[in-house]
Structures are given as structure tokens and as C-alpha cells.
Amino acid sequence: MEPNFERYRTMLLRAGEPDRVPLGDISVHPLLKAGVLGRPIQTAADEVAFWATAGYDGVPIEQGLQLTPLIRQESMQEVSAQYAADTTDAQVRSWATEGQGVVASREDLERLAWPDPDALDYRRFEEIGARLPPGMKVIGVVGKVFTNVSWLMGLEGLSFATADDPELVNALFERVGRFQYRAFERLLDFDCVGAVWHADDIAFNTQLLVNPRLLRKHVFPWYAEMNRAAHARGRLTVYHSDGALQEVLPDIVACGFDGLNPIEPGAMDIEAVKREYGSRISIIGNIDLRYTLTRGTPDEVRAEVKQRIHDLAPGGGYAVSSSNSVPEYVPLANFNAMREATLTYGRYPIAL
């Protein structure tokens, strides 16, 4: 089936039922992309070909502070190990500092070689945009207002600083928020961008990572402003965070997001979220990454996708995706089963 961003847009706007339930993942590991496409992803044309072939309606492209050396080299550490399901080769993953990060004082903050958001490389948006088939759009991925701060300070360092040095916390959130906002503004200048996805993990399985007051003061206002700017220019927005978000779901909805992802199983009840908030925000995700996609069989994946579509898709406002992303430890057969089951069972009207 040909890509059609209007399908995705209809889902996000909760404007009734499109022709089928969209696929909603925006992060798939290159090993699985190569498995679907039959060749490694080496060019912009390959990237577009993967997302179109796999059944998606948009091509995600990330931009922001998280891609700069300040984060990738100064705030993260790389670890090589065998993570993948379908190969014994090693892969490299980046892990954030959990203790004290590179910013522990105002002097640390001022000493940083802070990049210029206007000097980031935006050519990927031009390269991908020029190769999109008719009806397909780019999904710009920014977010990480909280995440970048926690990486720069370390989650432990940030936690102590909220009590010991709140002015430092204020200054760093202001610096990060303004950087991400400017990168977001630049994305809106590309006609190929149809939606913006803000990925910013603020919770784990049982609760938020920090007091919700910090999020309400330093994080959600940035997203509310970005959402207003995006909507003013005809773009849609999605918020992604793993974990238990119940305590701040009203705040997330009040920010004006069009979609919420991934509604992690075990942490949240997706049917309860749909019942309470489904008239105000669309729901994307919930295919279990802890068991079904990673250790289950393709038949188990198909059964879970079919059940989610049956329960959540009637009337629209639902897209299928993993409960986080599609990392290398998902077997290709299971990823394909998720995609194929969506195409098979997700055609409207949904069989009840």
C-alpha cells in the first residue's frame, strides 16, 4: 500500500477512520531496516525506500542538541556488546552518565563549548525531502528538553541540584530549552515536514523520574509553546515518553500534543488512557517490547497487534507501534509480523 501522510494526519487529528491503521514507530535499528530492504541503509534514497517499503507514511529525521558533540562525546559513553537478535556481531550503544555529569556548577555551564542551533546540519531534511514519494512526509524528531539536561548533569546530579542549586537548574533548562526550540523552528521551514515528534523520557515503570513540579516549571511550557507554533503552521505533534505517566497525563494533554506514544505495557493501561483521553489525544503504540516483540513468536506478535487494533482502532485515533522503539534485539521476523499484521487487520472498518 502506498505511503499516505493524510492517513497519519487523520489518525493524529482524531478525524474519523482513515483507510487503515497507520504504523507509528519512528526509530528502527539499521540492522532491521537492512533486513526489510534487502540491503544496508547507506543513502538518503535507501532511508526513504525503507520507510515506504515497510508501510510507514513518514520518514523520521532527528535534530537537536542530542546529536552534537556536547552530548554525544562529552556526556555519553559508548559500550560495544552483542545486542542483536539476528547476528552474533557486536554493536555499539551509547549510555548516559547516571551520577554526576559534565555540569555541576554555573562555572561548568559557562565553560561548555555551546553549539549554535543555526549551525547544525539540516541538509538531511533537504536530501530526504527531495526523494519522498507523493503523499509521504518527514517527521521531525526534536524533544529531549528534560533528557538533555539530565544527560548534562547526570540524573543524580540533577536530582541533588534541584535542592542545592536551583538557579543552576533554571539556567540549564533555559539554555537547553532555547536550543531545542530554535532547532524545532528551523524544521518548520522545510515544507517536507508534516509533523514533529518530541521524544523525552521522564518516567520509568512505576513513576516519574523527578518531581512533577520540575516538569511543570521547566519542561512542559517549552512543549506547549512548540505545539502552538507547530499548529499555527499546519504541523502536528506527538509526545513520546516511556514509563508511568499517569501523574502528568493531564499536563501532557494540556500542552496540546496531537498524539501520545508509546503507552508502555505494565506501566500504563492503554485502554484506560484511550477511554479517558482518547477524545483529546491520539494513541500510538503498546506492542510489548519486553516479551512479545523480543522473545515472543511471530504468531504471538500478530495476535497482540490484532487485539490492540480490535480494542483501540475503531473510530480512529490509534496507530500501531512498539512500546518504545525497534532496537536490534527485536528479531526481524517479529518486526515483520508487527508490520504485516497491521496491514492485514488494520483495514477499516475494523472487524469486531
Image (tube, rainbow, N blue to C red):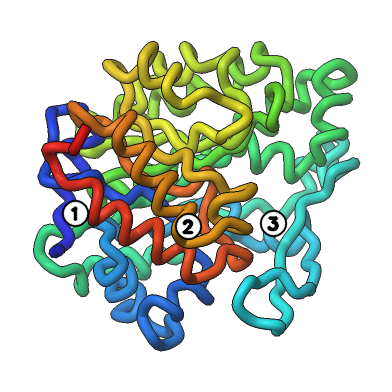
Label 1 sits on a secondary structure element that is loop
Answer with left or right where residue 214 lies relative to residue 279: right
User: Quick one: quadrant of the N terminus?
Assistant: bottom left
First of labels 3, 2 by sequence position: 2
Q: How dense is the environment of label 1, judged by Cα within 10 Å: few (below 14), some, or many (20 and up)?
A: few
Q: Which residue is mark 3?
A: 70
Using the numbered discs, state the Cα–Cα distance from disc 3 to disc 2 in whole angstroms. Answer: 22 Å
Q: Is residue 160 above or below residue 4?
A: above
Dot 1 amino acid type: Asp
* Marks 3 and 2 close (CB-CB < 8 Å): no
Label 3 sits on a secondary structure element that is helix
Q: Is residue 206 above or below residue 292?
A: above
Answer with left or right where residue 225 lies relative to residue 326: left
Mark seen at residue 230: none
First of labels 2, 1 by sequence position: 2
Task: Name which residue lies at 33% across and 73% down.
Answer: 50
Using the numbered discs, state the Cα–Cα distance from disc 2 to disc 1 in whole angstroms. Answer: 22 Å
- Where residue 270 appears, as percent x and y from the top left, is 46, 26
Q: Which residue is mark 1?
A: 191
User: Quick one: quadrant of the C terminus?
Assistant: top left
